[in-house]
Structures are given as structure tokens and as C-alpha cells.
Image (tube, helix red, strand yellow):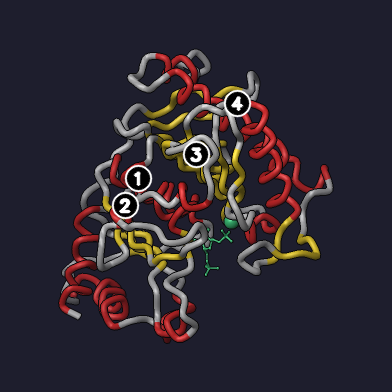
């Protein structure tokens, strides 16, 4: 394993442009730094909340801000991106003269789990830069336009799961050398599953298609699905989606009556969470939907737009879509 090829040499053998490969390596290096900060935890005094909120009105953790700064600093100084948009920042930042790529990221997804030592992650998406000095509207491209997407899971191992549009590979951080090494050549989401993941605390708010889907799964082998299902919810999207990417399952964060009453389309963000994860799911043979449409086909209308998310094993996503189609 320690002689498995490094990320840079794997990308060098790909058909991706050299500056895009360098950009991915730059992101991976910054994430290796975030992995160190996460791993040191309270030894570095970085656990706990800050007395401030982000653009979404959510309480920020110290590590949210540290991770955000590490990614922005790395990208700014690299010259490998022309624009950056972060879940933690209200507006995008242009980097004139950079290579023709836009990078979007959620620097530390699931950070409410940090203080209880549960896996968190960084999610990123790379789009083509249409002009020299990108503004927010230049980032509003459908997920189908992504040139690459990935996540880094800071768990028992630090893993990078990456697609440049030709399947999905997994790399493991070799802490000895501080480099990511290839650990899985072609990830595939099994088409069928016996597992679902949803925050059941919102059950009283669920729309009928979701309520009936979950009830049918819970009914097990004597119910309409004719088999038993298991339920898992880590409340950390990277960890939940990584389980789905590895052994199948369906991950749901749907919209519901309570969200609709508040005028919210969902919880998770299209540009920083749903699109990159949807790209990876599709590239691994899975599917990603809102329940009503394919996530990657959505024309975004805002940097921080929220969407319902149903992703994972293709047959299960189709089953849920068919329930929404029936109404
Ligand atoms: P965050 O980006 O503020 O961390 O929020 C996203 C997270 C996801 O990682 C996770 O799937 C979800 O929020 C958990 O929500 P809940 O607290 O409702 O279980
Ligand atoms: Mg986040």
C-alpha cells in the first residue's frame, strides 16, 4: 500500500489538462493540512464554536474558519484557479490571472459533529471559468458542467474520493509522507440496497412520498418491499455518502412541510454539497435526484441555493422518484 501511486502520478496518466491536475493536487495538499488540524483536535485548541455565524446564519466552529482559510490561502497563492466560492463566504472571490477554473467548496461539512469526534469532510467542485474576472453569476452553472469533484473524509483514515469525469477513485492519506495514495481504482455504488439514511426527527414534517417510502422500508420482509432494510444516520454528509459510495444505500435530505412553510427548498446546498456529491454518485453508477429531477441538470439561481437530496443506489433513487411522480 505504501508503494501505491501518489495522486499526482495517477493524474499525470489521465487525459485531464496539466493545470487541472495541479489544481486537484493543490486542493488535496490543503486538505492534508486540514486533516492535521482536525486530528490534533483540542491539542491545538481549535475545537468549539465561535461567537459568530456564517452567511447562512449557522454558528461557525473554529475549524470551519480554519479550514476555509487554509483552502482560500492555498488556492490564492497557487495561481491555479480564477475564482473561489465557499459555503462560508457570502460572495465569490476572483483571482485575476489564475488558470481557467472556478473552485467551490464546503470547507468542513458536518462540523457540528467535530466536538464529538465523528467523521467530517471537505467537499469541492471544479467548474470552467467563463471569463477573466468571474463574478457570482459565472459560478451558476449546472452540475453537469463540473470538470471534477471530490470529497475528503477525515475519519479513521483520511480519504480523498475524486472524479474527473471518468469514474471515481479513492486515495488514502499516507501521513508518513503527507501524500494521498491510490487505494481504490473504480468505486461503484451497488444498484440495489437494503439501507437508507434520513434524519427521522423530521418525520412529522415529511411529504407523502418520503413518509410512505420510509414506512414501506420499515415494514421489512412482510411489507410491500418484501425485504428488510437497515437505517443509518451519521449527520455528517461526507460520512453518510461515503458509506453509500462504498456499500450502497440511499441518502435522503428531502424538503418537507416545515421547510416549505419557511420558504426553504431543502437543507443542503446545491453548489457546495449536492452537485459535487451528485457528480461522484453518478460517476460511480449511482444516481442523484431531488425526488423530482436530476440534481446535475438544475440551472442554479444562487450561490447558496438549497435543494432536496436523494442520492445513492440507482434503483432506490428511481423508486423514490416514481413515488414523487405519482404525487
Ligand atoms: P453543514 O454544512 O452546516 O455542516 O450542514 C450539513 C450537514 C450534513 O453534513 C448532514 O448531512 C446534515 O447537515 C445533517 O443534518 P441534521 O442535523 O438535520 O441531521
Ligand atoms: Mg458546512
Residue receiving disc 2: 296
Whole-number angstrom distance, CA of label 3 to CA of label 1 = 16 Å
SS for dot 4? loop
Question: Which is more toward the observer, 178 or 247?
Answer: 178
Q: Residues within 10 Å of mark 4 (few under 14, many from 20)?
A: some
Residue 179: percent from left, percent from top: 58, 22
The residue sitting at 56% across, 30% down in the picture is: 28
- What numbered label is drawn on residue 79? 4
The residue sitting at 41% across, 55% down in the picture is: 274
> Is residue 17 visible to the viewer in this orientation of the structure?
yes
- What numbered label is drawn on residue 315? none
Relative to 320, 198 lies left or right = right
Image quadrant where one finds the C terminus: bottom left
Q: Are marks 4 and 2 in contact (CB under 8 Å)?
A: no
Q: Are marks 4 and 1 in contact (CB under 8 Å)?
A: no
- What numbered label is drawn on residue 279? 1
Relative to 138, 323 lies left or right = left
Nearest to the eye among marks 3 and 2: give it. Answer: 3
Q: Residues within 10 Å of mark 1 (few under 14, many from 20)?
A: many
| Image: 101 above or below 122 | above
Residue receiving disc 3: 102
- Label count reads 4
Nearest to the eye among marks 4 and 1: give it. Answer: 4
Amino acid at each position: 500500500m505504501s508503494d501505491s501511486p501518489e495522486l499526482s502520478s495517477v493524474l499525470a496518466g489521465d487525459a485531464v489538462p496539466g493545470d487541472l491536475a495541479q489544481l486537484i493536487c493543490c486542493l488535496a495538499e490543503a486538505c492534508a493540512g486540514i486533516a492535521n488540524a482536525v486530528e490534533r483536535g483540542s491539542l491545538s485548541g481549535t475545537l468549539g464554536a465561535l461567537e459568530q455565524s456564517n452567511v447562512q446564519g449557522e454558528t461557525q466552529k473554529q475549524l470551519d474558519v480554519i479550514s476555509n482559510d487554509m483552502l482560500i490561502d492555498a488556492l490564492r497563492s497557487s495561481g491555479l484557479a480564477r475564482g473561489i466560492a465557499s459555503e462560508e463566504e457570502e460572495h465569490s472571490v476572483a483571482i485575476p490571472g489564475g488558470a481557467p477554473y472556478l473552485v467551490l467548496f464546503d470547507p468542513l461539512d458536518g462540523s457540528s459533529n467535530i466536538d464529538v469526534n465523528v467523521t467530517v469532510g471537505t467537499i469541492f467542485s471544479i467548474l470552467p471559468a467563463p471569463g477573466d474576472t468571474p463574478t457570482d453569476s459565472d459560478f451558476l452553472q449546472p452540475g453537469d458542467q463540473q470538470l471534477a469533484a471530490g470529497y475528503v473524509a477525515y475519519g479513521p483514515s483520511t480519504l480523498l474520493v475524486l472524479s474527473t469525469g471518468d469514474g471515481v477513485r479513492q486515495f488514502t492519506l499516507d501521513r508518513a509522507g503527507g501524500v494521498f495514495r491510490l487505494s481504490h481504482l473504480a468505486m461503484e455504488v451497488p444498484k440495489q440496497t437494503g439501507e437508507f439514511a434520513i434524519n427521522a426527527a423530521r418525520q412529522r414534517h415529511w411529504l407523502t412520498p418520503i413518509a410512505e417510502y420510509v414506512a414501506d422500508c420499515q415494514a421489512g420482509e412482510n411489507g410491500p418491499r418484501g425485504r428488510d432494510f437497515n437505517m443509518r444516520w451519521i449527520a455528517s454528509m461526507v460520512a453518510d455518502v461515503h458509506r453509500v459510495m462504498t456499500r450502497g444505500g440511499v441518502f435522503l435530505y428531502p424538503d418537507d412541510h416545515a421547510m416549505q412553510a419557511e420558504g426553504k427548498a431543502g437543507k443542503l446546498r446545491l453548489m457546495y454539497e449536492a452537485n459535487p456529491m451528485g457528480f461522484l454518485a453518478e460517476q460511480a453508477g449511482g444516481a442523484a435526484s431531488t425526488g423530482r429531477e436530476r440534481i446535475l441538470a438544475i440551472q442554479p439561481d444562487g450561490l447558496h441555493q438549497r435543494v432536496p437530496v436523494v442520492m445513492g443506489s440507482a434503483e432506490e433513487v428511481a423508486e423514490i422518484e416514481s413515488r414523487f411522480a405519482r404525487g
